[in-house]
Every structure is written in C-alpha cells, then in structure tokens.
C-alpha cells in the first residue's frame, strides 16, 4: 500500500531491488519443494518456445544472477522466478513467430511435439497477472501478507495452472482452494475495482 492508503502503482513507485549477493543468497535458500514447484510451472510455459525441460528455469536463474532481471525486494524467490520464466517464454514465442521457416509447408519434429500455448481467454484478475512488470506481481502479493495459500494460488495462476494441477501445487483440497480464491478476488475487487492501472 502507498503512504496515502491507496494501492501501489506499477510506475513511478520507488521499488527496492536485491543486489548480487542477496540474489545468490535467495537462490541458495530455495528448498527442494520450491524447486519442484518451479519445474512444475516451467512445464506449462514451454509450449511454442523451443526450450526443453529445465532449460527455461536455468535461463531465468542465469538472467537473475547476472541482474538482467531486477529482483524487487518484496517478491519471494519462487514468485520472481516464475514471473521471469513467464516473461522469457512469452518473448521466445513472439520471436519464433517472427522467424520464417526455410520450408513453410514443413514443421519440425519439435514443433509437432510442443504443447499448446497457454490460453488467452483469461478473466480480468488473470490478465493482471499476465502483465510483464514484476512490481505488479509484488504489489498483488503485498495484499496477502502471511496468507501462504493465497500467494501460492497467485503463483499457480501466473504459471497457468488450473484445476488439479493448481490444487496439487498449492497442496490443498478443492474446498480450501475455492476459499483461497474467494479471498483473493475479494481483496482484488476492493483495491482494483477497474483492473490494474499503471
């Protein structure tokens, strides 16, 4: 929240970022469970990118270490790496669409085997999560301090997880998941009645 009591804004805000040593410490602190969650979300981003499993996560981690991606201090490691992977995957898809194949009538084997690109049919809250800025994700997370279930649901949505995959990711049953989603939508409606405005 801003000092005036209103919601934070993506632009014009004074976001603090981790330095190189803090980035490395944060990455070293990832648990085995965190890494499994990151790999689960990574799979949902691979379609249409040309990346292979583990390669996208590795690329995201390298960009974070070399500070090609600034890490807002308020965003936890899993959230930031998911947002970074999503952004890299999105750019990779756009780049591949611009490339003209040597034989337009023939598709490569890797192209046939790729999973479909995540659906564009998102509700307004999910459109917020599709935005490029990491500080948008940071601002949303700041509305759920201490609510790990709500934060995990947001991370899952960012990774395009739905249904059983989302339940497994959060580690709850359907009733608990529904209640967490209800809490998120209530908060987002209160702070962003007209959607995110930067």
Image (spheres, rainbow, N blue to C red):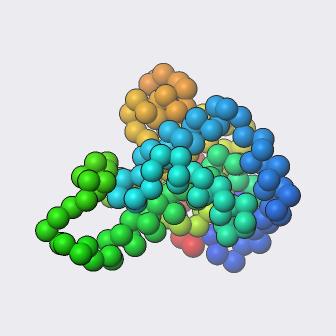
Q: Can you give x and y, in whole percent of width and height, for residue 191 in the image?
A: 58, 57
Count of all numbered marks drawn on residues in the image: 0
Q: Residue 91, relative to residue 184: is it above or below? A: below
Identify which residue is drawn at 62% across, 38% down. 35
Q: Is residue 37 visible?
A: yes
Query: Which quadrant would residue 15 be assigned to in this image?
Result: bottom right
Q: Is residue 157 visible?
A: no
Horizontal placement of 157 versus 140: left or right?
A: left
Taking depth in this image into account, of 185 and 150 the one nearest to the observer is 150
Residue sticking out furthest to the right: 21
Q: Quick one: quadrant of the N terminus? A: bottom right
Identify which residue is drawn at 40% across, 60% down. 49
Taking depth in this image into account, of 101 and 191 the one nearest to the observer is 101
Identify which residue is drawn at 78% across, 65% down. 17
Q: Can you give x and y, in whole percent of width and height, for residue 31 in the image?
A: 71, 34
Q: Can you give x and y, in whole percent of width and height, for residue 33 in the image?
A: 64, 31
Query: Which quadrant would residue 22 be assigned to in this image?
Result: bottom right
Taking depth in this image into account, of 169 and 48 the one nearest to the observer is 48
Horizontal placement of 32 versus 57: left or right?
A: right
Q: Quick one: quadrant of the C terminus? A: bottom right
Horizontal placement of 27 versus 180: left or right?
A: right
Taking depth in this image into account, of 152 and 52 the one nearest to the observer is 52
Identify which residue is drawn at 78% across, 48% down. 26
Q: Can you give x and y, in whole percent of width and height, for residue 37 in the image?
A: 57, 37
């Amino acid at each position: 929240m801003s000092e005036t009591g209103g919601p934070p804004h993506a632009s014009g805000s004074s976001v603090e970022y981790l330095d190189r040593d803090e980035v490395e410490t944060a990455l070293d602190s990832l648990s085995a469970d965190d890494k499994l969650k990151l790999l689960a979300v990574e799979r949902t981003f691979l379609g249409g990118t040309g990346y292979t499993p583990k390669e996208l996560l590795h690329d995201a981690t390298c960009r974070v270490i070399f500070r090609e991606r600034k890490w807002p201090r308020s965003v936890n490691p899993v959230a930031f790496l998911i947002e970074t992977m999503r952004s890299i995957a999105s750019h990779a898809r756009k780049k591949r669409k611009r490339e003209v194949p040597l034989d337009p009538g023939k598709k490569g084997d890797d192209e046939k085997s790729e999973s479909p690109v995540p659906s564009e049919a998102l509700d307004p809250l999910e459109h917020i999560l599709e935005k490029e800025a990491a500080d948008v994700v940071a601002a949303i997370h700041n509305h759920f301090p201490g609510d790990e279930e709500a934060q995990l649901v947001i991370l899952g949505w960012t990774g395009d997880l739905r249904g059983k995959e989302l339940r497994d990711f959060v580690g709850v049953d359907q009733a608990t998941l529904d209640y967490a989603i209800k809490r998120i939508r209530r908060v987002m409606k209160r702070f962003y009645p007209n959607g995110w405005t930067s």
